[in-house]
Image (tube, helix red, strand yellow):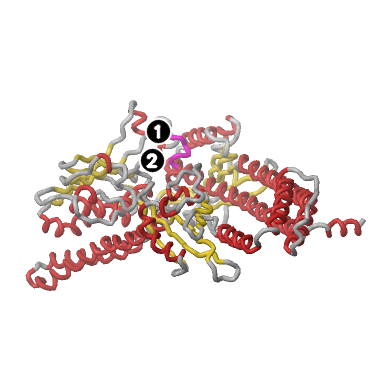
Amino acid sequence: MFEMLQLWWAEFTLQTRLLAGATIVVSIVMSGVTFWAVNSIQENAQVNDTRFGRDLGLLLAANVTQTIADGDREELARFTSQFYGSTSSVRYIIYADSEGEIFFGIPYSEQTVKDSLTIKRRIQLPQDLLQSSLPFVRQHESPGGQVTDVFVPIHDGDRNLGVMAMGINPNPTVVTSSNLTRDVTTAVFVSIWALVILGAVFNALTITRPLKELLLGVKNIATGNFKQRIDLPFGGELGELIGSFNDMADQLERYEEQNIEELTAEKAKLETLVVKIADGALLLDRELNIVLANPTAQRIFGWDLHADYLGKNAIDLFPTAVQAELTRPLYKIARGHREGGEFRVVTAEPVRRTIRLLVSTVLDPSGQNLKGIAITVQDITREVELNEAKSQFISNISHELRTPLFNIKSFIETLYEYGDELAPDERHDFLETANNETDRLTRLVNDVLDLSRLESCRIYHLEPIDISQPIEQTLRTYQLNARDKGIELASDIDPELPLAIAHYDLLLQVFANLVGNSLKFTKAGGRVQIRAYRLEPKAEHPEQANAMPDHVRIEIADTGIGIDAEDREAIFDRFFRVENRVHTLEGTGLGLSIVRNIIDKHHSSIHLISEVGVGTTFWFDLDVAQSYDALSVLDPERSAVPVESPIASQTG
């Protein structure tokens, strides 16, 4: 039996053996990676259960702290029972004092609940729990399954009120999903491995024999035996291949009786064409007539794919730009005065594109006589556009870097020349602005040159900020610029504006781009204003309005030249510049693209309203920091928001 397997294995080619071995190795590796991934998912599920239990315990403890401090056990029992009945994830809830004596627990029967106010029971508290403000979380196995225990110390100011213990059930969906994923993945990989091995064996048995016959026939043809034929009963692609081989042998047998030199020249032409077939390919004879033209070349030159161009002069068929570039070189090559070369041409017909033409000669076996000319045609329009975009990016980005450098130089130059004439407060403001611009320059180099990072999935940390601070910093930065241009730069900020969730540096960059654009496109005597006000939520019913988060709306308005309607959709695209159509001012074409990406990171959108000759207003909304009230989550009369939403908002 073993010898039969050895003989059977010996029939396979080295490639088939390597394929089988590689399939086994890949299957084993992928199976190992999959099991590791499934285990990681299960571990992550446990971490999520632990995190969920901790957050749920903190939430409940925060809601009952005042009740425990007031000693209202009846209200504590009512609220805890309501909380316990609202979710199936909680297995038990126990309250104990600082000595570990339990003064209330659930679930119990109604009579037990009443009696629990007087029953004295104790619970073993984790060590040093009461000295910490953080909850203690652990997991243990119970007859009913795994349980996550959460111990939360309860403090009222400096008073230690005791401990709340809560048991959380694991997420059954995650456990079931992990097991199912592991089983299905194992079955899939085993099936794939078996199918690949069976397929490799089947292909080896059906292809090895005809390939060996073809290999033998090719060797005979190479030695000059053009009477070689293959007679195997195969259909499909193999049958066509065998038939083509026999046809080739018939033609070679006939060609053998003809001029061997012409046959070799034709072979050289075909070999040159095959080497360059990936792009457009032309084969010309010594009279510059077309011998062969592939569809790619015909499409690039705008020729009819169904027309017959064989035997026609290529010069007469080339587009005008190609004619002007290739006519003289091709005639020189045909006369033997030139060996070939590379040419780059921009054509306007049938469409505008940039093409590269590689011209090479086809010589006879002696390498002395010219037999034809091969031309490779490559469409490099995209490559040229990318190079131009790269050059444009490098050129335009200097403008963004020049702005903070100009501001720094202006303030320092003013201090240098008129420092003695300025008041101490003015000198301090100048130095502070120069220092801020220096920091901004550092951020600008990192942020603008890393535009791709803004467009990626990188997560920025958002926090509550006072919107008036970046607005005032922007006004200080651009005040001198606006004064020099005769433009009024002002702000209108609601004095009771709440804190908004944002990234300070990114928001400052938004203001800088928008205000800079407004100043650039506003004439002398115009006005640029930044407005910030609270946008109250609107709903059909008052109870819905209480549950909806409100926002801070920020507007940057100017009395500039405006933006035409046809440009408003594309204005946020990279490198798009409206000034190319309406005036001669220059810009980077990146500012509004950066603005859009930054606002996207704030989970909002940038909008604009504009009228040519009147002005433009850009606006966007930011979430208010106090949009969600954790204490109102469990009170149906105060909020219609689901229990999970405020928790997700706080932990996110």
The percent coordinates of residue 109 (x first, y second) are 60, 31
Task: Note whether 649 is above or below 227 in the view shown.
Answer: above
Which residue is tagged 2? 629
Q: Residue at x 46, y 35 (%)?
A: 642
Q: Is residue 151 above or below residue 540?
A: below
Q: Quadrant of residue 604?
A: top left
Q: Is residue 644 magenta?
A: yes
- Quarter of the image holding residue 612? top left
Pinpoint residue 307: horizontal percent, then vertical percent. Answer: 49, 43
Q: Position of residue 200 (x, y in %)?
A: 75, 51
The mark total stands at 2
The amino acid pointed to by label 2 is: Asp
User: Does residue 153 appear in this view?
Assistant: yes
Tell me whether the residue at label 2 lies in contact with that at label 1, contact meaning CB atoms closer than 8 angstroms.
yes
- Which residue carries the number 1 mark? 639
Classify 10 Å Cα crowding around label 1: few (below 14), some (14-19), many (20 and above). Answer: many
Q: Say which element carries label 1.
A: loop
Q: What stretch is highlighted in magenta?
A: 639-646
